Image (cartoon, rainbow, N blue to C red):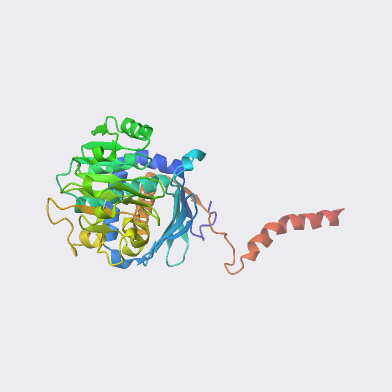
């Protein structure tokens, strides 16, 4: 707790808090709220100090830090990606994040971001699809039916108008899991035995696979006129989902170009391969889709501004609902310049008691 109130309290939202928040607010409302906040922040693009995330890669996965700030708040996310974590009973992706005051550096919010990242990734996909897909899109192929897939399905149902899902996963149990989880959710679901069958006739194709490899989940012969490709799974060096011919089929849109050049599907393309940052489309500074038969590609790797938006939304929603714990995250000293004093003062009482006992004896 924060006994004197002189030092800023940090609000802690753990996993149980976030589950309670989403249940009370509603998953659809949370996805829509984060999507609205993402659009708002993307329209303030120039106000942010932006950089590509810092990543430490290993043979089995990656651990990353994703920082961003405007003139008022700093945010970062810690996130991993370990495709084989299911063998250890752990999610492929785990994350937490912090919001802090730029003026003082004081941490204001410490928040779980594993569940929240799934929500914000789905929200970002829907924001991009609303800007790039055909407005009459109703059928989506979902390639990769792991932990992110249900959130993508709900986001596209609510924010884009998708009514039919065509599923494929290398693990049939994953597709069965997804189908079971969206029963009664207003979505027609069909499962297929190949990617080619699943994408045939789809308006939107979402790829959200986990394997850290240079895969070609989609090939040019699978692409039909008017499709929007929402490529989510290729998100680190050496990990792709799209054949380069798919990238050449239509305009490619990205979040933050310097990061996507390193991590996205465009890592396999020449350095001068043309892309458009999505904020420019949202702000009316660049064209998105220019015709019903055009193929569009959103090469999504996840960007810190989306996490900033999600942290802000979840922090504000938690305050509205009275969820979260106020904690003393910074040592509180009588003299801020005397940090050593907090140790001395804590030790002084037993030391004085010991000296008193000797004198009394």
Q: Quadrant of residue 194?
A: top left
| Residue under the point 21% across and 49% down | 228
In percent of width and height, residue 336 lies at 57, 67
Viewed as shown, does residue 274 lie left or right of 12? Answer: left
Viewed as shown, does residue 263 lie left or right of 104? Answer: left
In this view, which residue lies farthest toward the bottom? 337
* Viewer-proximal residue among 319 and 240: 240
Number of numbered discs overlaid on the protein picture: 0
Q: Is residue 211 visible?
A: yes
In this view, which residue lies farthest toward the front? 221
Q: Compared with residue 227, is residue 267 higher up or lower down, i.e. above or below?
A: below
In percent of width and height, residue 275 lies at 25, 62
* Viewer-proximal residue among 207 and 180: 207
Viewed as shown, does residue 215 lie left or right of 138? Answer: right
* Viewer-proximal residue among 26 and 174: 174
| Residue under the point 39% across and 55% down | 236
Viewed as shown, does residue 98 lie left or right of 142? Answer: right
Q: Quadrant of residue 30?
A: top left
In percent of width and height, residue 224 lies at 18, 46
Q: Is residue 26 visible?
A: no
In percent of width and height, residue 4 lies at 54, 57
| Residue under the point 65% across and 64% down | 341
């Amino acid at each position: 707790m924060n006994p004197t109130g002189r030092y800023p309290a940090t609000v802690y939202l753990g996993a149980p808090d976030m589950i309670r928040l989403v249940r009370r607010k509603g998953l659809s409302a949370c996805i829509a709220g984060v999507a609205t906040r993402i659009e708002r922040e993307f329209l303030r693009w120039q106000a942010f100090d932006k950089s590509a995330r810092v990543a430490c890669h290993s043979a089995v996965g990656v651990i990353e830090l994703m920082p961003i700030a405007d003139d008022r708040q700093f945010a970062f996310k810690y996130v991993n990606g370990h495709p084989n974590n299911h063998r250890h009973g752990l999610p492929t992706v785990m994350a937490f994040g912090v919001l802090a005051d730029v003026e003082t550096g004081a941490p204001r919010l410490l928040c779980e971001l594993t569940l929240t990242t799934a929500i914000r990734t789905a929200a970002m996909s829907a924001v991009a699809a609303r800007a790039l897909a055909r407005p009459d899109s109703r059928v989506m192929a979902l390639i990769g039916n792991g932990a992110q897939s249900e959130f993508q399905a709900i986001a596209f149902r609510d924010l884009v108008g998708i009514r039919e899902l065509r599923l494929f996963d290398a693990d049939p149990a994953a597709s069965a899991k997804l189908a079971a989880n969206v029963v009664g959710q207003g979505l027609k679901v069909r499962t297929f035995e190949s990617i080619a069958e699943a994408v045939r006739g789809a308006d939107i194709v979402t790829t959200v696979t986990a394997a850290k490899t240079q895969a070609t989940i989609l090939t040019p012969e699978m692409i039909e006129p008017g499709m929007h490709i929402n490529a989510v799974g290729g998100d680190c060096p050496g990990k792709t989902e799209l054949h380069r011919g798919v990238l050449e089929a239509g305009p490619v849109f990205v979040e933050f170009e310097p990061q996507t050049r390193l991590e996205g599907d465009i890592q396999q393309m020449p350095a001068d391969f043309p892309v458009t940052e999505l904020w420019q489309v949202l702000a009316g500074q660049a064209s998105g889709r220019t015709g019903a038969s055009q193929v569009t590609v959103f090469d999504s790797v996840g960007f810190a501004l989306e996490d900033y938006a999600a942290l802000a939304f979840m922090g504000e929603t938690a305050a509205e609902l009275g969820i979260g714990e106020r904690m003393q995250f910074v040592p509180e000293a009588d003299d801020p310049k005397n940090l050593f004093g907090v140790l001395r003062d804590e030790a002084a009482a037993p030391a004085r008691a010991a000296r008193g006992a000797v004198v009394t004896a």
